[in-house]
Image (spheres, rainbow, N blue to C red):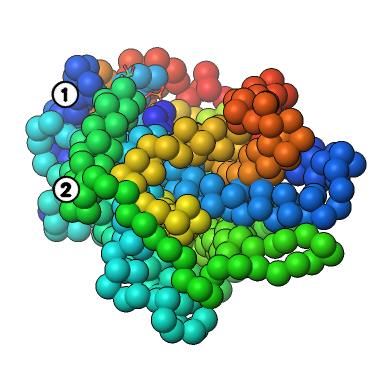
Amino acid sequence: MAEIPLLELAGVHTHIGRYHILHGVDLAVPEGRVSMLLGRNGAGKTTALRTILGLWRASYGMIHFAGAEITAHATPDIARLGIAYVPENMGVFASLTVAENFRLADWRGDLRPTRLDAVMAAFPVLAQKWRARAGTLSGGQKQMLAIGRAIAAEHRLLIIDEPSKGLAPGMVAQLTEALIGLKQARTTILLVEQNFAMAQALGDHVAVMEDGRIVYRGDMAALAKDIPLQTRLLGLSLASHQ
Amino acid sequence: MTPIARQPLSLGGRDPLPYLVLPALMVLALAAMKFSAWLTLTVAGLAVGCMLFLAAIGLTLIFGLMDVLNFAHGGFVTLGAFIVAAVFAALPASGGGAAAALGVVALALAAAAVAGGGLGLVFERLLIRRVAGAPLRQILITVGGGIILQQMLIVLFGAEPLALPRPEALRGGFIIAGAAVERYRLMVCLLGLVVYAATHLALNRTRLGLLIRAAVENREMVEALGFRAERLFRLVFAAGTALAAIGGVVWALYAGMVTADLGADIIILIFIVVIIGGLGSVSGCFLASLLLGLANNYVGFLAPKLALGTDIALMLIVLLWRPRGLLPMDGA
Ligand SMILES: Nc1ncnc2c1ncn2[C@@H]1O[C@H](COP(=O)(O)OP(=O)(O)OP(=O)(O)O)[C@@H](O)[C@H]1O
Ligand SMILES: [Mg+2]
């Protein structure tokens, strides 16, 4: 029962400049599951993800990944342990072409063609835009590029920050479908998402943040059923979001 | 959210107009003088331009890729000049034939590149890294570092100017269409072209260059993908200072002597070139260098009294026309 999670945060505090943003975050991401991290705007979700990646430094607490302590590791070293990160702003290189963005997907070198084919099958539009500069893509296409680039190389954990942000409903549905495919392939995912429908479709577990702390932890299915709890935690309900 | 996300190096469409400035200037000059004078002045001007380019390219690369304005850049140019003097003192090239002379020059270029790059690494580690992201302190520390570098060179090589006679094989020239063309100037043009092409290809056709362009745009994301951006930047810094030293070799051989003030004397010109070209732009740097070299020669010939103001006037005109320089951050 008590299997060791792939990623674990224990009592993590993060300061940005003189602001104290995370106040002791405890979070476990089990292998082969989709863990949702929810919370209102400004709750500290992005800060938590950036702290995992070493883009902000934890001022107290410990972060373990795959049995190693990574709290003080440099970002490239953390990534090399097998974490792929799709940031809130997607992090595509606008001045490079789609092809060039993919050339940087794997720090070890060139991608295996079969891997690339799989990504192109999931996001066919990327193959059409192969030679286009990423800066000329639409928001949804950029998000596909960002996620496609993240899954093109082999990783143990995929971290995505609000992929549905600013996308049209049709695009969100398409993205959800692609992520469901990853879930079915037993990819370990830590996903921050405000779109509750998407969260419900994907999440196995859920943690809810508020003011830099985790205030709720449980199964996604249980939270999806409990409208009053949703309203209290997130200020919205599944019904109101649809 | 990403504090380091910046203006991308390449902006889709290219602006063709700046590329026409150089041929336009050459045609205008041709209309104003005899062909033989024009040819001599043009070759000489292009050679000076290429020397300027070699001295300046490192500064613009380091700025474009690292956001560091290295005011000690001139010190690395001086270093290269002293290195070629030392190499020539150790291996007198005058006796041997053309091949021997070229060999010694090649050796001096290689030694300068190694010394400049190596010292650049030390410089980056000791000074630049401490002031990352603090522009004012960066200016102070690179100015100070430049002074220390110059003083160290004086201690090592002395304060007196060193004579540096060019080997026989690099002297003289030939007459084409009634115009005298110096051999060394042609060589300098060739070297400038080779360095320009190599930098361009390295940035645009290699995986390392791709990585550097990506890191300029979004350093955090490059690191989140598992690449060590810090090493990339260190490499760029060393390449920039190595190129400065190579520029010093070429200047010293051109001037026929070496002084500890060489770098300080041309640093203003280097900054003008880098500003006219567009900070961070390799092609802009090349274009601006040639423009400055040619304009100086043409104006010096046609209106000698105006020669002193040519550089500043050119900079004013270009900046009024294109406030960010001729080819701002085009990535190559
Ligand atoms: N660079 C920064 N400097 C100062 N404060 C910051 C910075 N980044 C975030 N914060 C603050 O940290 C808190 C948490 O921000 P964070 O971006 O982690 O929230 P979030 O849960 O991701 O919100 P959203 O849903 O809007 O993306 C906010 O109060 C925010 O103002
Ligand atoms: Mg956020």
Q: Which residue is mark 2?
A: B155
Q: Position of residue A50 (x, y in %)?
A: 30, 37
Compared across the picture, whether A198 is left or right of A209 comes to: right
Residue lying at 47% horizontally and 49% vertically, measured from the top left: B55
Q: Position of residue B52 (x, y in %)?
A: 54, 47
In the rendered image, the vertical position of residue A218 relative to residue B41, given as above or below: above
Q: Which residue is mark 1?
A: A23
Q: Nearer the viewer, residue B302 or B268?
A: B302
In the rendered image, the vertical position of residue A45 relative to residue B187, given as above or below: above
Residue lying at 16% horizontally and 23% vertically, measured from the top left: A23
Q: Residue A86's image quarter?
A: top left
Amino acid residing under circle 2: Val
The subunit letter for the residue under badge 2 reads B
| Number of numbered discs overlaid on the protein picture | 2
Classify the position of the N terminus of chain A by image quarter: bottom left
Please, which residue is most extreme toward the right here? B31
Compared across the picture, whether A18 is left or right of A32 comes to: left
The subunit letter for the residue under badge 1 reads A
Q: Residue B292's image quarter?
A: top right
